[in-house]
Amino acid sequence: MNLRAALLFAVASSAATAVEAQSMFKCVQDGKTIYQAQPCPEAAKQETLKVQAAPPKAASADIDRTIEFMSTYRACADAITIWREEMTGPYESWRQRNSELVSRIENDQQLRTRYEQRVDAKRSGKAGMCREVALELRGLKK
């Protein structure tokens, strides 16, 4: 029974800590402003601020797969004009559906570099790699 009580206390304590972590306190005392996770001292003027949690980061596997897909598309589109003309519309729709990952890759210098390296590596690849991307863009494969 003591183990169960201790476990219940630990869960309750961690839940309380999680709730506190979502609030931030702005304390103004003697003309100085301090931001902290704990409530202000009684002598300070306190304002409670709501802190939004950061959006969850995409899993590394999702990023890797998206880089592979985008780089294959780019290599194929650069090499085969008729393929590019046919796939541009579906690719733009795919980009919109995956805008969070695409934006992250394009705006993060390290991810952007990985993407560009993969495009360069695929430029001399076989045309068969384009088939997989075309099938997915047409909704025939996921």
Image: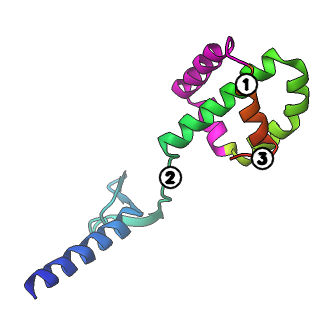
- CA gap between label 3 and label 1 equals 16 Å
Residue occupying image coordinates x 69% and y 13%: 123
| CB atoms of marks 2 and 3 within 8 Å | no
Which of disc 2 and disc 1 is earlier in sequence?
2
- Amino acid residing under circle 3: Leu
- CA gap between label 2 and label 3 equals 29 Å
Discs 2/3, front: 3
**Magenta-colored span:** 100-126
* Mark linked to residue 128: 1
Image quarter of residue 4: bottom left
Q: Is residue 140 left or right of residue 70?
A: right
Q: Position of residue 56 (x, y in %)?
A: 50, 52
Residue occupying image coordinates x 79% and y 35%: 134
Residue under label 3, please give it: 140
Q: Position of residue 89 (x, y in %)?
A: 88, 37
Report the quarter where the N terminus lies.
bottom left
* SS at mark 1 in the image: helix
Residue under label 2, please give it: 56
* SS at mark 3 in the image: loop
Quick one: label 3, few (<14), some, or many (20+) residues within 10 Å?
A: few
Residue occupying image coordinates x 20% and y 74%: 10
Q: Is residue 118 magenta?
A: yes
Image quarter of residue 126: top right
Quick one: label 2, few (<14), some, or many (20+) residues within 10 Å?
A: few
Q: Nearer the viewer, residue 119 or 3?
A: 119
* SS at mark 2 in the image: loop
- Amino acid residing under circle 1: Gly
Q: Position of residue 90 (x, y in %)?
A: 84, 40
Which of disc 3 and disc 2 is earlier in sequence?
2
What residue occupies the far left of the structure in this picture? 2
